């Protein structure tokens, strides 16, 4: 067996179930977190009026819209035999499989709602949100790598690579603003 084909077990030898491939929730977690980071950085305008509730609603609306577009594009890119009812069912299934992208934006949405309720400053909220999302990207990357069969050292390196995406958003935010 090569490095990413060995069976995974919990402490005590209990085998982990095979990774879920259908909804691809792991991909959606990374994608949604990157989406939330980009939106958080873009919505915070220096010198502009800070509107955390408005920003939270835009993160949610954009995540749902991106998920719908992504699911629809996947559905349209494949041709499956069957009648209209079957194709509508497949479309609904493709759209449903995008829920992880939306869920992955919830930490950013919750942070923005809390910022609005507590009247937090935009700079701090953006900094905390981008840092949190970078940590989540590291966690997603490492968790997914372990889940699909990588050894811990390789999984941590993959997590580091995913976290680097979050760092890239932070650097871009600093350079653009």
Image (tube, grey):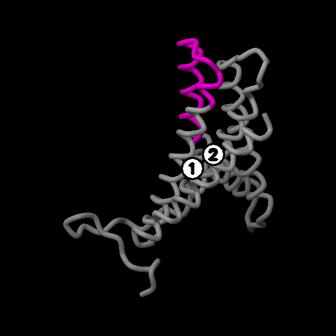
Pick whichever, 164 or 93, lies toward us.
164
Task: Tell me, for residue 29, which label it has, or none.
Answer: 1
Mark 2 surroundings within 10 Å by alpha-carbon count, few (fewer than 14), some (14 through 19), many (20 or more): many
Q: Secondary structure at mark 1?
A: helix
54 shown above or below 90: above
**Count of numbered marks:** 2
Q: Main secondary structure of the magenta part?
A: helix
Q: Which residue is mark 2?
A: 32
Q: Which residue is drawn at the image coordinates 62% and 48% (left, top)?
A: 166
Task: Give x and y (percent) for residue 157.
Answer: 50, 65
Q: Is disc 2 in contact with disc 1, using a CB cutoff of under 8 Å?
A: yes
Q: Quadrant of the C terminus?
A: top right
Q: Give the extent of the magenta segment.
A: 104-126
Looking at the image, which is closer to me, 167 or 29?
Answer: 167
How far, Cα to Cα, is label 2 from label 1?
A: 5 Å
Residue name at image x 51 percent, y 46 percent: 135
108 is within the stretch colored magenta: yes
Magenta stretch contains residue 158: no
In the rendered image, which quarter is residue 27 located in?
Answer: bottom right
């Amino acid at each position: 067996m090569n490095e990413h084909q060995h069976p995974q077990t919990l402490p005590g030898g209990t085998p982990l179930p095979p990774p879920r491939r259908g909804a691809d929730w792991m991909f959606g977690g990374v994608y949604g977190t990157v989406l939330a980071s980009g939106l958080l950085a873009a919505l915070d305008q220096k010198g502009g009026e800070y509107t955390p509730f408005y920003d939270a609603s835009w993160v949610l609306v954009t995540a749902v819209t991106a998920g719908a577009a992504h699911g629809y594009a996947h559905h349209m890119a494949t041709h499956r035999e069957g009648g209209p009812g079957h194709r509508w069912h497949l479309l609904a299934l493709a759209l449903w499989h995008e829920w992880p992208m939306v869920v992955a934006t919830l930490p950013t949405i919750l942070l923005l709602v809390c910022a609005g309720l507590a009247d937090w400053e935009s700079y701090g909220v953006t900094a905390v949100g981008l840092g949190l999302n970078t940590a989540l990207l590291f966690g997603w990357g490492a968790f997914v790598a372990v889940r699909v069969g990588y050894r811990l050292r390789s999984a941590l390196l993959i997590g580091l690579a995913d976290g680097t995406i979050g760092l890239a958003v932070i650097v871009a935010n600093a350079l653009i603003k």
